[in-house]
Image: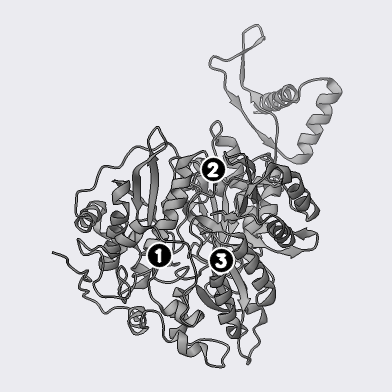
């Protein structure tokens, strides 16, 4: 007997957003009506429903003038499963950014593009152009499944990567809203030509053996209320954590046999990073290991997890509505049992996995079919032309001339692929002419850093992020050089608010905007993004970064283990130990200069010095001027500075004893 999905009864009143979704007629209103009005902006209801279509209403805070209307503009976000961007779509986005936007494009941390600065009167032209040129924005925002991520690696000789990209696209298709409202509004009802959907995906969307779908609904999986909040998915391969899988609501890990044939997937669930300052009931959380699923059952398993969150997620409090809170409150065992009910069979045991690594795929690589792909670093994802830096021009020229596809990455970079080896040098020359550095010329601090856009357009931003992180990274590099760590690097991420778009809570050093020009500081994430960082400071002004970070870097230099990363060090020693060191630390600039190690020795009765059993080595500090005098005198006498310092200290101590 086929049953229909039903929502769990709620003891508290649903949030206002639930009413907006119910009244929207499957995401049509009030967007359709307000779009026709000669205004510069939408109402609050319109703003919320517009998000499902892939657009946020914003205003440029740099242009605010008291007593005047805000400078309203719109950001559109594309939905590109696995980061795939066909050349036709990229050139369309490039053109739209010049005609209707702010002349830049921005690669997102979920492998899409954002187009900023669009006016309300131009929205329909921009939406329709994207849709007609092999693109979509549907579901890039809103309370439903967002863009599905996958490793940006177009290998043709590594089937696991091909499966990851394929299933990222199929899961995206499975969970794409089915409402006709999107095409009615932006294409006047004409549905754009798109790639043929996998028949297995279509069948899975309609099947309803255990209440995972609604009968006779325009939205068979979501229903009229969609999800309680955003839902984020990724698909990856064992060992490759380029997708930040622990931060996702749902992640699938491809398993193949020795012949390279797909067998199934490991399943993670319950990750999520958004939180609110001073609201301890909100928190970042890493995903849990849930189960293993055979390939033939994967779509049913995905639907079972979505249905569990859809029906039991908190619809009364949007701050508590993500899947991570449901699993945290109910427990992993409860979640597994509930998913199994929707799935219709017991869940299989999770399979062992190798150690995770972060890979960014920058530089030139062989695809495995005789062609090449090239990973280009895009600082903070901003594709622009600025002075001698002409990235936007370079990409346009390469794509126009050679009709090459792209994969945009979870780290806000761009990969161009299917490159014939005979045009490699030409592409390299274009990049060089346009001032684009290769990956080896980029400071690793910059290479592995991320920041959200924040000011001036993001309505949630408390302070700056993208516009200040270049100078912050420069200051960190100067500070590392000062303390003798000039070759050190680690993962730095910055956001202008606590919502976590650039995933700062997984970074080794995270900056989270908490007040004007002030940030919460997080330490201890891992280089492979498998562990949450922890907050060590709640509100640090940007001018105080050096004073705060210097003792932490010094402590790291003194006490790190062999090859230990900064994040692993902070996690091992703990925040209390770091705080204690910071409290007792005095800067070398103002107080002392450390000199070479002095051996503690003992003397025999005959006066000959011998190393004490179990030789101990100590370090002492002296003021700058004393150190310089010691150094000069040691050079004059031809003695090691440690010997001269030991003799001087010994003479002084003997004199003190004699006087006593």
Picture colour scheme: one colour
Q: Can you identify the residue that label 3 sits on?
A: 496
- Residue 52 coordinates in the image, percent (x, y): 44, 74
Of marks 2 and 3, the one in the foreground: 2
Q: Residue at x 37, y 52 (%)?
A: 287
Name the side, left or right, on which 50 lies relative to 594.
left
Q: Which mark is residue 128?
A: none
Q: Can you identify the residue that label 2 sits on?
A: 155
Label 2 and label 1: CA atoms lie apart by: 27 Å
Label 1 crowd (10 A; few <14 / some 14-19 / many >=20): many
Of marks 2 and 1, the one in the foreground: 2
Most foreground residue, 131 or 150: 131
- Residue 520 coordinates in the image, percent (x, y): 53, 60
Q: Quadrant of the C terminus?
A: top right
| Labelled pair 2, 1 in contact (Cβ < 8 Å) | no
Label 3 and label 1: CA atoms lie apart by: 24 Å
| Labelled pair 3, 1 in contact (Cβ < 8 Å) | no
Q: Residue 457 is drawn in which quadrant?
A: bottom right
Of label 2 and label 1, which has the lower sequence position?
1
């Amino acid at each position: 007997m086929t049953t229909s999905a039903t929502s769990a009864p709620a003891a508290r009143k649903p949030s206002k957003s639930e009413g907006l979704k119910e009244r929207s007629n499957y995401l049509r209103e009030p967007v359709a009506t307000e779009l026709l009005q000669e205004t510069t902006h939408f109402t609050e209801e319109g703003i919320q429903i517009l998000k499902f279509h892939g657009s946020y209403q914003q205003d440029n805070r740099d242009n605010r003038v008291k007593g005047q209307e805000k400078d309203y503009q719109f950001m559109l976000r594309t939905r590109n499963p696995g980061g795939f961007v066909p050349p036709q779509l990229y050139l369309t986005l490039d053109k739209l950014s010049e005609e209707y936007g702010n002349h830049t494009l921005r690669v997102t941390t979920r492998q899409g593009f954002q187009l900023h600065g669009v006016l309300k009167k131009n929205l329909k032209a921009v939406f329709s152009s994207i849709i007609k040129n092999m693109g979509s924005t549907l579901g890039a925002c809103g309370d439903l499944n967002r863009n599905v991520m996958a490793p940006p690696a177009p290998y043709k000789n590594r089937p696991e990567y091909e499966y990851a990209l394929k299933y990222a696209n199929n899961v995206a298709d499975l969970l794409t809203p089915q409402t006709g409202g999107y095409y009615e509004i932006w294409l006047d009802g004409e549905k754009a030509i798109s790639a043929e959907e996998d028949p297995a995906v279509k069948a899975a969307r309609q099947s309803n053996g255990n209440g995972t779908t609604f009968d006779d609904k325009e939205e068979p999986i979501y229903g009229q209320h969609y999800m309680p909040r955003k839902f984020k998915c990724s698909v990856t391969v064992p060992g490759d954590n380029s997708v930040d899988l622990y931060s996702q609501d749902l992640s699938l890990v491809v398993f193949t046999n020795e012949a390279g044939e797909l067998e199934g997937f490991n399943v993670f669930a319950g990750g999520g990073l958004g939180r609110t300052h001073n609201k301890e009931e909100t928190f970042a959380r890493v995903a849990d290991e849930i189960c293993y699923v055979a390939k033939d059952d994967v779509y049913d398993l995905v639907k079972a997890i979505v249905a569990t969150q859809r029906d039991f997620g908190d619809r009364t409090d949007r701050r508590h509505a993500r899947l991570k809170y449901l699993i945290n409150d109910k427990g992993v065992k409860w979640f597994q049992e509930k998913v199994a009910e929707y799935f219709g069979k017991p869940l299989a045991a999770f399979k062992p996995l190798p150690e995770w690594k972060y890979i960014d795929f920058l530089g030139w690589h062989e695809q495995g079919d005789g062609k090449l792909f090239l990973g280009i670093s895009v600082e903070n994802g901003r594709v622009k032309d600025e002075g001698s830096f002409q990235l936007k021009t370079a990409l346009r020229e390469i794509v126009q001339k050679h009709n090459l596809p792209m994969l945009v990455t979870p780290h806000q970079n761009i990969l161009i692929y299917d490159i014939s080896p005979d045009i490699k040098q030409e592409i390299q020359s274009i990049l060089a002419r346009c001032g684009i550095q290769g990956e080896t010329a980029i400071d690793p601090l910059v290479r592995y850093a991320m920041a959200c856009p924040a000011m001036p357009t993001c309505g949630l931003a408390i302070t700056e992020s993208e516009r200040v992180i270049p100078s912050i990274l420069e200051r960190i590099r100067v500070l590392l050089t000062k303390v003798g760590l000039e070759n050190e690097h680690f993962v730095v991420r910055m956001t202008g608010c606590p919502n976590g778009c650039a995933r700062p809570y997984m970074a080794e050093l995270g900056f989270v905007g908490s007040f004007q020009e002030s940030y919460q500081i997080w330490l201890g994430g891992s280089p492979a993004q498998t562990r949450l960082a922890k907050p060590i400071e709640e509100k640090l002004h940007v001018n105080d970064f050096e004073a705060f970070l210097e003792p932490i870097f010094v402590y790291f230099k003194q006490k790190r283990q062999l090859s230990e990363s900064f994040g692993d060090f902070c996690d091992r020693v703990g925040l209390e130990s770091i705080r204690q060191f910071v409290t007792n630390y005095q800067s070398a600039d103002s107080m002392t200069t450390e000199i070479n190690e002095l051996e503690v020795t003992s003397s025999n009765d005959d006066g000959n010095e011998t190393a004490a059993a179990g030789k101990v080595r100590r370090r002492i500090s002296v003021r700058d001027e004393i150190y310089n005098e010691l150094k000069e005198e040691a050079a004059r006498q031809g003695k090691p500075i440690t010997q001269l310092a030991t003799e001087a200290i010994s003479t002084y101590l003997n004199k003190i004893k004699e006087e006593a």
